[in-house]
Amino acid sequence: MGVCLAIVQAAPSCPAATPSASHTLHHVHGPAVATPEGHETQSIRRQIENARTAREALLAREKQQGAEMQARIKAQHDAEAQAQRDAARATELSAATVDATARLQRTEQDTADLDSRIAALHTEQDTLHRALTQDVAALTPLLPVVERLSLYPADTLLAVPLPADRAVTGLLVMRGLTTRIAQQARQIHDRRARLAQLDAELAQQKGRMTQLLAQQESQRDSVNRSAHAALEAQRQSNAAVRSATQQVEDAARKASSLQDAIGRIEEVERTAQANLERAAQEAERAHRTQEAEATRARARALAAGPGPGVNATRPGSAGAPVPGSIVTGWGQSTESGPASGVTYAPPSRATVRAPCSGRVDFAGPFRSYGQMMILNCGQHYRFVLAGIGDMAVAPGQQIVKGAPVGQMPAWSGAQARPTLFVQLRRGGTAVNPAPYL
């Protein structure tokens, strides 16, 4: 075999090794050596396998991304549906309190009126007591003379001899004095009779006041329970709704003034509306028609607002947000210029009612306004109520007109009386709220 190899290397004419011989050589001297054609084939095969694996991974990734997109869309739709259910539930609970709150407000107004009546009776009583004291003081020096005249008229008049004319004058003076004394006596009698009537009326009115206060507390407890049930339903709302609400609330808290707060809230809404419009256009370009329609519907709903706007109330209707009296009317001169709203002086712990149906944009302390809420009525109308003691609503909550939104602070008369400031704005402009209350 070694001779043959030598011949092959030396002489080309030596016959080529047969395949069987070649196979024998490779087998004898070591493992088979791959040919260039074998390397190329394996490389191609590996490339094909890699391409197939990459394609399968890409398809799997696309499938996963599609599933994730569908899951996100479904989650968004579920969040929107839940938001609608939350809003409907909150609105339903809010509506259920309207009648009870109206009855409570009438009771609070009756209590306030009765309290004013009792105060007026006490004032009249004090005035009569002072008048009686003065009458008695004026009559006291004359009483001895009157008593002597009644007992010894002749001796009294003849005690000092007088000319006839002066005696007649004296008799006339005595007659006038007697008439005056009689008048004063009648006044004293009438005033004492009136005081007796006042005492009886005060006792009756105080009994009525006790009944009203008990009725008021019972109604107030019922309304507060219903209001807090609506508030709890709002707090249980889903995260998607809270996120949108938080943007509006944060914008208001960053504001430097009430007008700035309204402006920032409207800017947030305009931005959200523009984002929805862009999302709808992107969905259309991707041929996601159903998603585009749903997004545009949300944009239209945002533009319309969460409520029906405001409507002028019927003359004489009880539309005031609190019982009590108006201390500053719209446009009235104040230290800071014409009043931009209406200020009420309500009774202690009076219930505050919503002046329109809509959504709470803001509820909490704000600058020098104290506890304040901004109620979005829709159609770019917003009511601002400032000076509330205990708030019974939360940002994002849907409420109906006449529902309770909070209570005024307690007031005993020893400190400054709490007041409620009510302002109506259309966009950035304050308008007279009186026709809508």
Image (cartoon, rainbow, N blue to C red):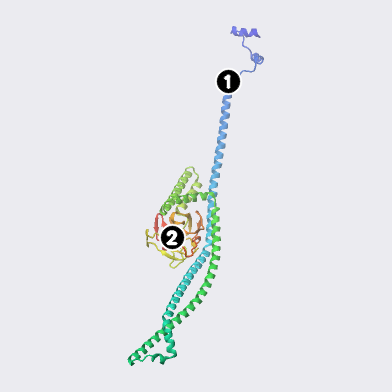
Q: Where's residue 22, x and y in %?
A: 64, 14
Q: Say which quadrant the N terminus sits in.
A: top right
Q: In the rendered view, would you say 18 is above or below 357?
A: above
Which residue is nearer to you in this view: 337 or 135? 135
Could you tell me which secondary element the residue under label 2 belongs to? strand
Which one is in front in this view, the residue at disc 2 or the one at disc 1?
2
Residue drawn at (57%, 34%) of the image: 57
Residue 138, disc: none
Label 2 Cα neighbours within 10 Å, binned few <14 / some 14-19 / many ≥20:
many
Which residue is nearer to you in this view: 112 or 25? 112
Answer yes or no: is residue 79 visible: yes
Q: In the rendered view, would you say 362 is above or below 168?
A: above
* Residue 138 figure quarter: bottom left
Label 1 Cα neighbours within 10 Å, binned few <14 / some 14-19 / many ≥20:
few
Residue drawn at (43%, 91%) of the image: 152
Reading the image, the residue beneath label 2 is 421
Q: Where's residue 266, x and y in %?
A: 43, 51
Answer yes or no: is residue 437 visible: no
Which residue is nearer to you in this view: 192 or 300? 192
Q: In the rendered view, would you say 363 is above or below 346?
A: above
The kind of residue on which mark 2 rests is Phe
Label 2 or label 1, whichever comes before in sequence order: 1
The kind of residue on which mark 1 rests is Glu
User: Mark 2 and mark 1: span between their CA atoms?
Assistant: 94 Å
Could you tell me which secondary element the residue under label 1 belongs to? helix
**Is the C-beta separation of discs 2 and 1 under 8 Å?**
no
Reading the image, the residue beneath label 1 is 37
Which residue is nearer to you in this view: 223 or 276? 223
